[in-house]
Amino acid sequence: MYVCICNGVTDKAIRAAAADGVSSLAELTMRTGCAGTCGACADFAEQVLHEALPRNARLFDLPILAAAA
């Protein structure tokens, strides 16, 4: 399903990005463009991303990177 209509990003693309090491919405936006235009999909995109992350990747979120984004 499409998560970001503006940039044509699907849930499959978000899961693939998570498998490639993307672990934050800022990284996802840089990699795929998701949530980079209107931002309406940001919450759902972040939810899909975090569900796709391996459990150990969720334990070490870096708030400094999130604040910088």
Image (spheres, rainbow, N blue to C red):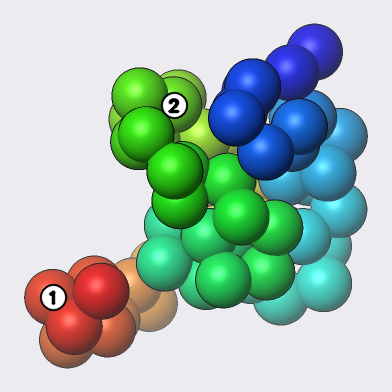
Instruction: Give the residue type that dot 2 points to.
Output: Cys
Q: Residue at x 38, y 77 (%)?
A: 60
Image height of 53 relative to 67, above or below = above
Q: Find residue 38 and name its label.
A: none
Q: Secondary structure at mark 2?
A: loop
Classed neighbour count for the residue bearing mark 1: other residues with Cα under 10 Å, few (<14), some (14–19), many (≥20):
few
Q: Secondary structure at mark 1?
A: helix
Q: Residue at x 77, y 60 (%)?
A: 17
Image height of 49 relative to 54, above or below = above
Position of residue 56 in the picture relative to residue 61 (left or right): right
Q: Nearer the viewer, mark 2 or mark 1?
A: 2
- Where, by quadrant of the figure, is residue 10 drawn? top right
Label 2 – label 1 distance at C-alpha: 19 Å
Q: Residue at x 41, y 67 (%)?
A: 26
Residue picked out by circle 1: 67
Asked whether the beta carbons under mark 2 and mark 1 sit within 8 Å of each other, the answer is no
Residue picked out by circle 2: 41
Position of residue 18 in the picture relative to residue 19 (left or right): left
- Using the image as rendered, state which of residue 53 and residue 31 is in the foreground: 31
Q: Is residue 1 visible?
A: yes
Instruction: Give the residue type that dot 1 points to.
Output: Ala
The quadrant the C terminus occupies is bottom left
Q: Position of residue 11 (x, y in %)?
A: 75, 29
Image height of 14 relative to 33, above or below = above
Label 2 or label 1, whichever comes before in sequence order: 2
